[in-house]
Amino acid sequence: MNPPPRSLSPRRVLRGGPVVARCSLAVALSLGVGACGSSDPVPLSPDASVADASVADAPRSDAPAASVAIAFAHTVGGAPLALGTTTPYTNAAGNSFGVTRLSYFVSGVTVRMRDGRSLTAPGARYLDAAMPATLRFALPGAAPVGELASITFVMGLPPELNISGAFTSSPESLMEWPEMMGGGYHHMKFEGRYINRAGEPFNFMAHSGGLNRADYSFAVTLDASGRSITAAGASFTVRMDVAEWFTGPNTWDLNDYFNATHRGIMGDAAAQASLRENGASVFSLAAP
């Protein structure tokens, strides 16, 4: 049985200590997006400084409102991703590969309307392809009814959220990034096997994170024109094509990144930057 959806609530993250509390307050004041808000569709507690994130953009009291759910799905070239130890997929460099793990954070998921209104799920969400309950969540509060312009979010944890010790329970806590490499948390753990030049299976671990405190998170904006939120509510699905992590603008031959002398990319700043650049084509909005 899958565990229930995990809500990274303000209370939970604020327990990480004074540094996190200060971070939450600073972000709420400067960015309008709280450090670690709840994704549950209920009002945030009065002591949660991130509550302001949705208030400013909330629909007028006399305007119709609805609930909105966001789901994340994973594909390879349009086909649903299947986790396993085989290597059924082929990337742009011709490498046969398979995926055994895909877990990551997204932050500040927001629906934006054509009239300028918006609704945000403040803070971070942990998503895991092996845990379906983590892949769908409701935005907190009531969304405005009307035509959409875009759906936006940050892939990973921006610096103000990427603070060591913020998450004390698994599976989020298991995403820790080594302190010697800058601390905080992985943005993503993307793992699997590929067939190397010797014709043998070799493990790859495409782990991204804040190497030496550099920010390798990035903003994603998905065009949602032609879609609407009605009084009955709405549900939207964001797709991640995992093969796109290895192509455009940088084609990855996995032999060059994962081999006997270079087993991972966590300490490779050039690889971290390249993976972030490739993220530009990874996400799309599924057809209604």
Image: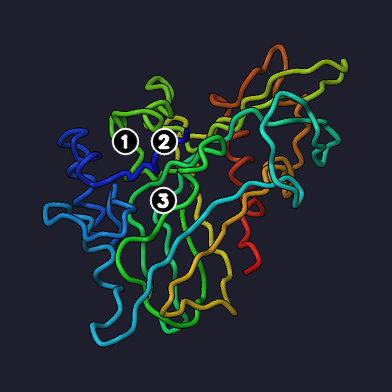
Q: Quadrant of residue 170?
A: top left
> How far apart are the alpha carbons under marks 3 and 1?
14 Å
Q: Hey, which residue is sitting farthest bottom in the picture?
A: 62
Circle 1 packing at 10 Å, graded few (<14), some (14-19), many (20+), is many
Q: Quadrant of the C terminus?
A: bottom right
Earlier residue among tags 2 and 3: 2
Circle 3 packing at 10 Å, graded few (<14), some (14-19), many (20+), is many
Residue at mark 2: 3
Query: Please, what secondary structure does the residue beneath circle 1 have?
Result: loop
Q: Quadrant of residue 54?
A: bottom left
| Percent of width and height locating residue 182 | 39, 28
Q: Residue at x 47, y 51 (%)?
A: 136
> How far apart are the alpha carbons under marks 2 and 3?
21 Å
Residue at mark 1: 163
> How far apart are the alpha carbons under marks 1 and 2?
25 Å
Residue 233 vs residue 38, the one in the foreground? 233
Which amino acid is tagged 2?
Pro
Q: Nearer the viewer, mark 2 or mark 3?
A: 2
Q: Nearer the viewer, mark 1 or mark 2?
A: 2
Vertically, is 25 above or below 54?
above
Residue 52 vs residue 160, the one in the foreground? 52
Which dot marks residue 94? Answer: none
Query: As drawn, is 62 to the left or to the right of 203?
Result: left
Which dot marks residue 107? Answer: 3
Which amino acid is tagged 1?
Ile
